[in-house]
Each structure stands twice: as structure tokens, then as C-alpha cells.
Image (tube, rainbow, N blue to C red):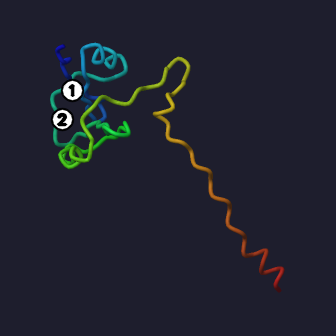
Amino acid sequence: MTSKKTYWMADGQGAVALVEGAEERDRLIPLGWADSEPPAPDQQVWMRHAEHGGRAKFPLASVELWRPRGWSECGPPPVGDPFTAEVPADVVAPVSEPAPPAPSTKSREKQDG
């Protein structure tokens, strides 16, 4: 079995992604991505962790530092369906509960005084 050809794609906002296969490249073009050259020094690169599958953008200068830690160049994270505004669960970070408000010191002063 032969491996698929890889393509560099740019999002127009300074980030590039390495996608595998013409099908994936063609899927990203209507979403605002364009064919690109390999990343320039001022661009960020989408990378994915081999173990936990998380994705993040890294400055090109730091890519070599992250590869030994399990990160490699990849495509962008999946996007939600623009017609239903549903976003895949792995794209949205869970919202943490807000901290309870601190007790007011004014009410204590009135009680003590």
C-alpha cells in the first residue's frame, strides 16, 4: 500500500497545516484554506500529540523541540457543521465552574462594630 501525498495548507491567519491526501486538501479549500509552501519562519504549525491526540499551533521555531515529546505536524482540528452550529466535543474545551464569590468584608465590619 502506498502512502498518501501530503500537502501544506495555509489558513490566511499565519498558520499552516500538513494534510494527508488530496481528499482532505479538497475538503479544506472551501473552508478558507489554500495550498501553501512549507512554513515560513513567522508562521505557526498545527501539531498533534501521538498519545492523547490533542492539537495545538506551535511557532515554527519550536517544532523541533516538540517532536521528541510526541508531537508531529498535522491537519487542523475538525470544524463544526456550519449549518447547524454543532461543534464536535473534542474541539470545545470544557468550561470550568466559576469560583464562588469571596465573602464581603463590609458586612462583617457592621456585625462586629
Would you name the residue on which mark 1 appears?
Answer: 8
Give me the disc on residue 39.
Answer: 2
Give me the disc on residue 40.
Answer: none
Residue at coordinates 34% horizontally, 30% vertically from top-left?
Answer: 76
Check disc 1 and report its element: helix, strand or loop: strand
Q: Residues within 10 Å of mark 2 (few under 14, many from 20)?
A: some
Q: Which of 26/68 is in front?
A: 68
Check disc 2 and report its element: helix, strand or loop: loop
Q: Which of 107/50 is in front?
A: 50
- Furthest residue to the bottom? 113
Instruction: Measuring from the top left, give residue 27's x and y in whole percent.
Output: 34, 16
Q: Residues within 10 Å of mark 1 (few under 14, many from 20)?
A: many
Q: How many marks?
A: 2
Instruction: Measuring from the top left, give residue 64's x and y in whole percent.
Output: 17, 46
Instruction: Measuring from the top left, give residue 26's x and y in whole percent.
Output: 29, 14
Q: Is residue 60 left or right of residue 27?
A: left
Residue at coordinates 27% horizontally, 41% vertically from top-left?
Answer: 71
Q: What distance separates the C-alpha of mark 1 from that of mark 2?
A: 8 Å
Q: Which of 45/29 is in front?
A: 45
Q: Which amino acid does the dot numbered 1 rest on?
A: Trp
Q: Is residue 58 left or right of residue 77?
A: left
